[in-house]
Image (cartoon, rainbow, N blue to C red):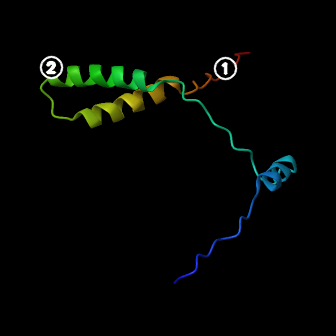
Amino acid sequence: MPTKTTKPKIATAKLTKKLVAKKVIAPKVKKALPYTLDDVALRAYYIGEKRQQLGQPGSPEADWVEAERQLIADNAPKAKPKPKPKKV
């Protein structure tokens, strides 16, 4: 009968906290998306409706991906315009 081998745990919770405190590793941060799945679904619906009205080929999956792409672009940080040099 084969014996079960287990790998030793490299980082325990205590060790992880110590490493984060010493800034050896970065803490895990969960970032919330600026949009919900309902937002994606609604946008994908309208993308699909428009695509079908125009008679273009496509699929609901492609509409979903396009909706996510648009929402990410809409919520991306805007670059500040460079100030114009003053004329002397």
- Picture residue at 65% right of the left edge, 71% below the top: 7
Q: Secondary structure at mark 1?
A: loop
Q: Left or right? Give the position of 45 relative to 24.
A: left
Discs 1/2, front: 2
Residue 30 in percent (x, y) is at 63, 37
**Spatial CA span between label 1 and label 2:** 44 Å
Task: Tell me the number on the disc at residue 61.
Answer: none
Q: Quadrant of residue 4?
A: bottom right
- Picture residue at 33% right of the left edge, 32% below the top: 64
Comparing 53 with 40, the one in front is: 40
Comparing 34 with 28, the one in front is: 28
- Residue 20, above or below 4: above
Look at the numbered discs 1 and 2 and tell me whether their residues touch, using CB distance below 8 Å: no
- Residue 1, above or below 42: below
Q: Quadrant of residue 87?
A: top right
- Picture residue at 35% right of the left edge, 35% below the top: 65
- Picture residue at 73% right of the left edge, 64% below the top: 10
Residue 1 in percent (x, y) is at 51, 84
Q: Left or right? Give the position of 70 relative to 27.
A: left
Give the residue type that dot 1 points to: Pro
As drawn, the residue found furthest toward the bottom would be 1
Dot 1 corresponds to which residue?
83
Q: Secondary structure at mark 2?
A: helix
In the rendered image, which quarter contains the C terminus? top right
Dot 2 corresponds to which residue?
53
Give the residue type that dot 2 points to: Gln
Residue 31 in percent (x, y) is at 62, 33
